[in-house]
Amino acid sequence: MNIFEILYYAGCSAKKKIKLSNQKKLPVKVISIGNITTGGTGKTPATIAIAEKAKEKGFKPCILTRGYRGDASDICFISKGDGPLMDVKTAGDEPFLMAQYLKEIPIVKGINRYEAGIFALNNIPHEKKPDLFILDDGFQHWGLYRDKDIVLIDSMNPFGNNKLLPVGRLREPISEIKRADIIVITKTDSGENNIDIGSHKTLKMIRKYNFNAPVFYSKHKPLYFKNINGVIYPIEWAAGKTFYGFCAIGNPESFKETLLSIGVNLKYFKTFRDHHNFTETDIRHIINEAKENNLEWIVTTEKDIIKVKTFNLPENLFSLAIKFHIDNEFYTEALGR
């Protein structure tokens, strides 16, 4: 470790000790979905899929989220199960996207997830009162007890350069995956890092520190393209068309690989920092750059399209919808038999 890693780890360790000494437990089951690195593991599609499966299995789930980079500071509903109650800037991009997808599943935002859970239990009608909390991005949220910790690891870039923040992507040392109850290696259908190559090396590293947690392999499957007016186009629609791609996600290379894997003729690809707040100048630059290079179509992620909807957008701008796919045994492990 260099001095910056040592300082970061010392601060995190002190915080962890304090939070664990005051850890609280909610009166219903809590499962956490998180990661050991910063961004890029595909956590939002996974959280959506788990919430939907929980509802299908008869649970009344509620998502508790920090709402990273969202302006709302007080505990509040992002959704009561019928769409977002605030704009993307207030909610945060990932919670807003979840609220668009999830029907009859409330989402509560709060930095203190225990207090957010109590708020949900006190403010959701009795017939819909949660019997399961899904803790979004909760692996390092020491203040709340979890019944199960699910950790997602990106097959394309599992641990970055194996260094801690701020010089690497690790939030904690890799050895801390020993705490995970369930581990999911994500995006195992992406490029060269498929289940036989990249995931095999990652599994060896996991088993070095965690012998007992079941390990599952997931895929992020492209579903369809959608234009700015909400019209859906099948994946095959992109064949033979030239595209300008852009995104502001944790692992932009995974989005690029996904586009290439479905036959998109990607001539130009621009990346921004994860959770970047786009400006109208950004979008004008993208549009002009596409025109200058004679690229007839522009494509981005669902997470990014929601952040630019208020701008004057061209009709040739599309988003690509992605769905989390995993073996059903994973949901049995996560939600109970």
Image: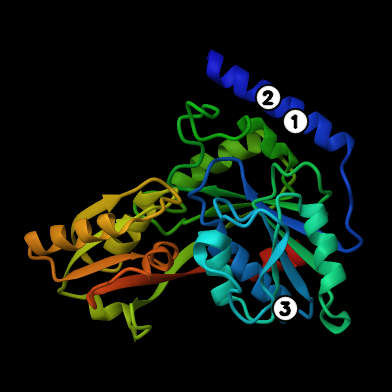
User: Farthest top residue?
Assistant: 3
Q: Which quadrant: the C terminus?
A: bottom right
Q: Earlier in the sequence, mark 1 or mark 3?
A: 1
Residue 52 coordinates in the image, percent (x, y): 65, 75
In terms of image quadrants, where is residue 232?
A: bottom left
Amino acid type of the residue tagged 2 in the rendering: Gly
Residue 160 coordinates in the image, percent (x, y): 46, 35
Considering the numbered disc 3 on the image, is that residue within a helix, a strand or a loop? Answer: helix
Q: Which quadrant: the N terminus?
A: top right
Q: Which mark is residue 55?
A: 3
Q: Is residue 306 left or right of residue 91?
A: left
Q: Which residue is mark 1?
A: 15
Amino acid type of the residue tagged 3 in the rendering: Lys
Q: Is residue 278 left or right of residue 185?
A: left
Q: Is residue 327 visible?
A: no
Of 19 and 254, nearer the camera is: 19
Q: Which residue is mark 2?
A: 11
* Vertical side of 70 occupied by 322: above or below: below
* Vertical side of 100 occupied by 220: above or below: above
Residue 297 coordinates in the image, percent (x, y): 19, 71
The type of colouring in the image is: rainbow
Q: Earlier in the sequence, mark 2 or mark 3?
A: 2
